[in-house]
Amino acid sequence: MNHRERIRNTLLGQPTDRPPVSFWRHFYHREGSAEALAEAMLEFQRTYEWDLLKVNPRASYHVEDWGTKTKRPGMGPLDKPKVVESPVKEPGDWAKIRALDPTKGVLGEHLDAEERIAAAVQGDTDWVMTVFNPISIAADLINDDERFVNHLRHHGERVHEALRAITETFAGFVRETMVRGASGIFFATTDWANADHIDKELMAEFGRPYDLKVLSEALGGLVNVIHVCGPNAFVDEHLDYPVGIVSWDAHGEGNPKIAALRQRTQKTLLTGVDHEGTFVNGPAAAVQEEAKEAIQESGGTRFILGPGCAVPAVAPMAHFQAVREVTLACA
């Protein structure tokens, strides 16, 4: 099977020649332009031949056009950008957040990167673009979690106004992404769908309605993913989202294990390896053992081996080869 056949069969619950696998990470020193980002993604794909290519964009791409500024402490591959200026500080600042043309500015640059990736994979591999959900984008515009929750509770209509603008912008971005040949989107909740940051009531009001509007623009894609991030994640509350794949950290505190979630959904599961623990610290044999256990726990159907979230840049590159070898050995 080629990569696309393997993913499509997996989504349908049909037999595959081996379990599909997909991992992703940032390349901080190669994310400054559309050309560099696309080449970083494609080089990573060529090296490890992931069955699903998740485009990992610049970490702040979703908020830069509204005025967020970042700075890297150095020029090396491990120098993660830090936010140095945010557009929202006071409740009245939410009025500054207006709908944008997604084909312009930083969003336009990322559409350019998508075009380059699509041209290179030429239909042999499904690729998905990472899109953060509107509440996550709003949180990153203020860059202060405690203050953000305060605004949700006490200045909700101001935040709703901004969320409507954010949703309009990213619904347009997703539309443009699908036109460029994406198989779907990787829709990430970051910290705003787990009990460490928000309660279910706030999530239902400020999260779900806007999520569904953005996702509606990707319904033509066959490979849409909902990524419910962090420990104590509200995974079950997202099982009815219109996607075919559920991604979460099966090793995170308070999160469902693979076998338990399999009992509650027939969607394809994307998880398996502790991305911040085992994958970073190793050794490679431990990474492989964890991958094997995940495949076994999945029951061998509707499962993609992957990380619980983006793999930290400090992780040894040899560990990517290690998980790849596990799936090849299953052929």
Image (cartoon, rainbow, N blue to C red):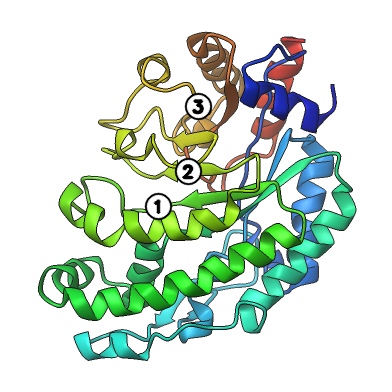
The residue indicated by pointer 3 is 267
The residue indicated by pointer 1 is 189
Q: Which amino acid does label 2 sit on?
A: Ile
Circle 3 SS class:
loop
Residue pictured at 20% horizontal, 77% vertical: 157
Asked whether, in this view, residue 254 is left or right of residue 214, the answer is left
Judging depth in this view, the residue of 107 and 243 nearest the camera is 243
Q: What residue type is labelled 1?
A: Thr
231 relative to 164, above or below? above
Circle 2 SS class:
strand
Q: Position of residue 212 (x, y in %)?
A: 42, 54
Q: Where is residue 211 in the image (x, y as percent from the top left)?
A: 41, 56
The residue indicated by pointer 2 is 226
Callouts 2 and 1 close, C-beta under 8 Å: yes
- Marks 2 and 3, how far apart in space? 11 Å
- Is there any visible trace of residue 186 in the rendered image? yes
- Marks 3 and 1, how far apart in space? 18 Å
